[in-house]
Amino acid sequence: MKKTNNIKSEELFKRAKELIPGGVNSPVRAFKGLDIDPPFIVRADGSKIYDEDGNEYIDYIGSYGPMILGHNSEIVNNKLKEQIDNSLSFGAPTRLEVEIAELIRSIVPSVEMIRMVNSGTEATMSALRVARGYTGRSKIVKFAGNYHGHGDCLLVQAGSGALTHGVPSSSGVPKSITDNTIVAEYNSIESVDNIFQEYGNDIAAVIMEPISGNMGVVPAAQEFMDYVRKITREYNSVLIIDEVMTGFRVALAGAQSLYKVEPDLTCFGKIIGGGLPVGAYGGKKQIMQCVAPLGSVYQAGTLSGNPLSMTAGITTLTYLKNNPKVYEELENKGQKLQKGIEKAIADFKIEATVNRVGSMVTLFFSKKKIENYGDAKKCNIEVFGKYFRAMLQHGIYLPPSQFETFFISQAHSEEDIENTIKAVRDVFSTI
C-alpha cells in the first residue's frame, strides 16, 4: 500500500501558498516541521479518504473528531439532501433548533438550557463571557495543554511554577487581555489549590478538558476532577467542561458521565454537527438565563443553528442514542489497536507509550507515561516525524502532530485495525 504519486497535491500546495497563509486554513494541516507536503483530499467514504492523486488512506483524523459514524454516512447524507430542498439557511427560528436542544438535554443531564453557535471557539468564548457576567468576576483559570479554541484570553501558555499568570502565546494578543487568565498545571491538585487560595474570590470560572486532546490524549485523574468540582463550588466559581472533542465521543453523555462530575456549563462541537460547522454551550438555567435576549450577556451569530448543521447533528445524535452498542464497538476497536501498538513497542524496544480513552488514542514517543503538558513536551519529535512520514507512505493517515489525537470511527473495520498494526510494526522495524 505504498504511496508514491503526489504530483497533483504538490502542485495544489504551491498554488495554495500564494493565496492562503501557509497554504492552509488551519495551521496543523500544513504538516509544519514534518518535511513533507500535505496530500490534498478530494473524497472520503467510511474509514477511507482519497487524495487528488488517487491514493487511498485509512483515516484516523475523521475531521478531528466529528465523523464518529465514518465518512459519507448514508443516514446523515440522506437527511441533508432532504433539508437542502427546503433551503440552506433562514436567519429565523426553526423546529430543528428546538429538536436538537431537546435531544442534547435528554442525553446530558447537566444541560438545562443551550445556545447553538458555529464553532468550538465560539462556544468557549461565549461560555466564559456568560460566567463572567453571571459571577461579576474577571479572572479565569485554564490548564496548560488544554486547548479551548483561539479566543484571545485562552491563547496562553504556562510559565514556570504552579501559579502563573498567562503570557500570550500568539502575536496579536495584548497582554492586558491575558492578565486575567491564570494557567494551572493539569492533574495537579496542589496547583489548583494554590491558585484558589490566592485569587479564589476573583475567579469567575475554571475551564477544562476532562480528557485533553490537543497535547495528545491525556485524561484527568478522577481525584483531580473531583477536587476541581469541589473547590469551584466552595468559591462559587463556574466550572466549564469543554466537551467539544469528548462530547458524545468517549461516551454517549460525554466525559462528564464517565467521571460522574456535573459541570455548571458545558461546551460542545464536532459530533453535534455531524461533520458540519457547529458549536454550542449550555448548562444550568440560572446561568444561561444571563444570555441575551433574556439577560445582559450579549452573544449572537448569523448562521447559529444553521438548518444543515442541525439536521446532521440531530441525525447523528439520534443514531448514537438509539444504538448504544456503537460505544462498545469503538471500545473494542480502540483496545485492539492499543494492544497491537503496545506489543510492537515492546517487540521493537521503541521508547513510546500509548494513552487511550475509548476511540481517542495517542502514541507518544516517550518512555514516561504522559499525565500533563510538561510530560508531553518531552516527547521525541524527531522520531515522531519519521514515524508519521513512514505511516503515510503505508497508507495510514494520522494527525500530523505528536500533540493531537487520532480517532476511531464505527466505519473502521477489523481489517483496518489489523492493517494499521501491521504498518506500525513495519515502521517500527526501520526507526
Image: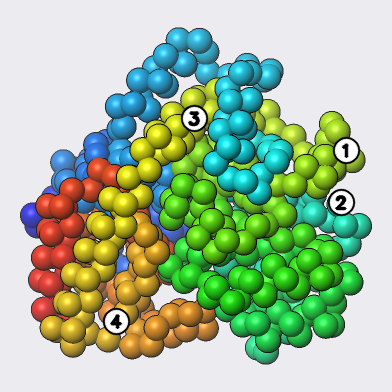
Q: CA distance from mark 3 to mark 4?
A: 39 Å
Earlier sequence position, callout 2 versus callout 1: 2
Local packing at callout 2 (Cα closer than 10 Å; few below 14, some 14-19, many 20+) is some
Answer with left or right where residue 21 lies relative to residue 332.
Answer: right
The residue at which mark 3 appears reads as 314
Earlier sequence position, callout 3 versus callout 4: 3
Q: Which amino acid does the dot numbered 4 rest on? A: Ala
Answer with left or right where residue 121 lies relative to residue 51.
Answer: right
The kind of secondary structure element at disc 2 is helix
Q: Are marks 2 and 1 in contact (CB under 8 Å)?
A: yes
The kind of secondary structure element at disc 1 is loop
Earlier sequence position, callout 3 versus callout 1: 1
Measured along the vertical axis of the image, is residue 10 above or below residue 406?
above
Q: CA distance from mark 2 to mark 1?
A: 9 Å
Residue 295 is tagged as 1
Measured along the vertical axis of the image, is residue 416 above or below residue 153?
above
Q: Is residue 298 visible?
A: no
Q: Which quadrant is home to the C terminus?
A: bottom left
Q: Which amino acid does the dot numbered 2 rest on? A: Gly
The residue at which mark 4 appears reads as 352
Q: Residue at x 38, y 43 (%)?
A: 324
Residue 133 is tagged as 2
